[in-house]
Image (tube, grey):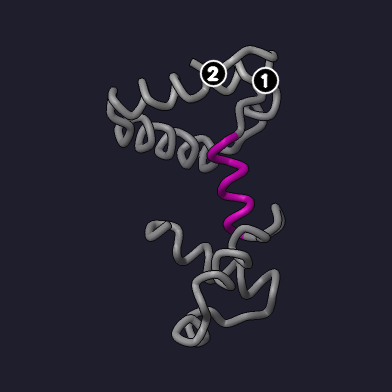
Amino acid sequence: MIDDFGLIISSFQTQYGIRISRDLQSMKWDEFRDLLSGLGPDTPLGRMVSIRSEDDPDILKRFSPEQKRIRKEWRTRTAKAMSQEDMDSFLESLKAALIYAAGGEPQ
C-alpha cells in the first residue's frame, strides 16, 4: 500500500473528489478502508491493479512495453515477497476451502 500511495491519492481525487493528502489527518481508518475498497477500475489504482493481475494471453499480447514492464516488476516482487512457509499455508487454506466448497469436511 505504501508503494501505491500516490496512486491511491490520485484515485481518491478522481473518483470521489477528495484531496486525501489534505483530509487524511481527520479521516477515520474505517472510512479510508471503505473508500479504498470502493475504488473503481477507471481510477489510476484500478488501472494499475488491472495491469498487474492480467493473465489473459490475448490481452497480454496487446500490452504496451510499459504495461509489460509494470506487470513483470509486480510479479517478480510479489514472488520474492512470499516465503515458502507462507505459500504452503496459503495452499493448505485453498485446499480446505475447495474441499469445503465441494461438500466435504475441512481437515
Q: Position of residue 75 (x, y in %)?
A: 43, 33
Residue 50 among magenta residues:
yes
Q: Secondary structure at mark 1?
A: helix
The answer to which of 96 and 39 lies nearer the viewer is 96
Q: Which mark is drawn over residue 106?
A: 2
Disc 2 and disc 1: Cα gap in Å?
9 Å
> Which is nearer the N-term, disc 2 or disc 1?
1
Q: Does residue 25 appear to the left or right of 102 in the view shown?
A: left
Q: Does residue 104 appear to the left or right of 27 in the view shown?
A: right
Q: Quadrant of residue 89?
A: top left
Q: Quadrant of residue 97?
A: top right
| On screen, residue 65 above or below 19 | above
Which span is picked out in magenta? 44-53
| On screen, residue 82 above or below 26 | above
Sort mark 2 into few (<14), some (14-19) or many (20+) by Cα contacts within 10 Å: few
Q: Position of residue 100 (x, y in %)?
A: 62, 19
Tally of numbered tags: 2
The answer to which of 44 and 29 lies nearer the viewer is 29
Sort mark 1 into few (<14), some (14-19) or many (20+) by Cα contacts within 10 Å: few
Residue 72 among magenta residues:
no
Mark 2 or 1, closer to the camera: 2
Which quadrant of the rendered structure holds the N terminus? Answer: bottom left
Give the residue at mark 1.
101
Amino acid at the residue labelled 1: Ala
Q: Does residue 84 appear to the left or right of 73 in the view shown?
A: left
